[in-house]
């Protein structure tokens, strides 16, 4: 009499065997990785460099930069770094949906500076290429 010890358990993946099973797992892994890589936010600023011209010392300069989320995930701006205490930045605190735009306002107080000015603001976000640079320059004349 024969026992049932020689009976094999069926493959849970169906008829796939050996290398074909590995190919299926590898394909699933690649699809997951590719979808993760391509589903990211992307910040785009139309005119990231501005020139405010020649101004008198003591004036307050306000520059507006329009940014847009060109990715397919929400964009979150987390921080704005400035190189001088004479500069303040007002940026959107709420997430930007894909293809949504917002305005960043950079205020530059010229009370304590003069001559040529060339400043950079760094916007940190969840964009993989973060931080993004905003630049402005001009000349501040003494009174």
Image (cartoon, rainbow, N blue to C red):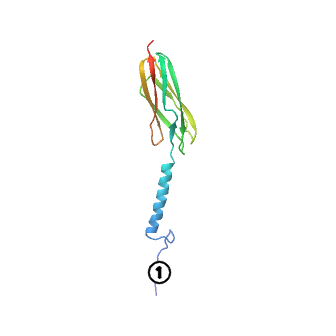
Residue 14 image point, x, y percent: 51, 70
Quarter where residue 86 is shown: top left
Residue at 47% across / 62% down in the picture?
A: 25
Q: Residue furthest top?
A: 143
In this figure, what is the number of numbered marks?
1
Front in this rendered view, residue 129 or 45: 45
In the rendered image, which residue does mark 1 sit on? 4
Residue at 52% across / 40% down in the picture?
A: 75
- Mark 1 Cα shell of 10 Å, populated few (<14), some (14-19), many (≥20): few
Residue 141 image point, x, y percent: 44, 16
Residue 103 image point, x, y percent: 55, 32
Residue 58 image point, x, y percent: 47, 15
Above or below, 58 against 97 in this view is: above
Residue at 46% across / 83% down in the picture?
A: 3
Front in this rendered view, residue 10 or 24: 24
Quarter where residue 99 is shown: top right
Task: Report helix, strand or loop for mark 1.
Answer: helix
Above or below, 76 against 85 in this view is: below
Check the picture and name the quadrant holding the C terminus.
top left
Above or below, 109 against 130 in this view is: above
Q: Residue furthest bottom?
A: 1
């Amino acid at each position: 009499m024969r026992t049932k010890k020689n009976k094999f358990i069926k493959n849970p993946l169906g008829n796939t065997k050996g290398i074909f099973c590995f190919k299926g797992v590898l394909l699933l892994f690649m699809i997951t990785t590719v979808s993760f890589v391509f589903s990211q936010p992307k910040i785009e600023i139309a005119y990231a460099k501005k020139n405010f011209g020649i101004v008198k010392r003591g004036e307050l300069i306000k520059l507006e930069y329009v940014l847009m989320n060109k990715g397919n995930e929400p964009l979150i701006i987390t921080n704005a770094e400035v190189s001088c205490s004479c500069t303040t930045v007002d940026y959107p605190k709420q997430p930007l949906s894909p293809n949504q735009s917002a305005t960043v306002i950079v205020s530059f107080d010229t009370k304590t500076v003069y001559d040529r000015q060339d400043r950079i603001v760094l916007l940190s976000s969840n964009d993989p290429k973060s931080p993004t640079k905003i630049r402005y320059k001009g000349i501040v004349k003494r009174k």
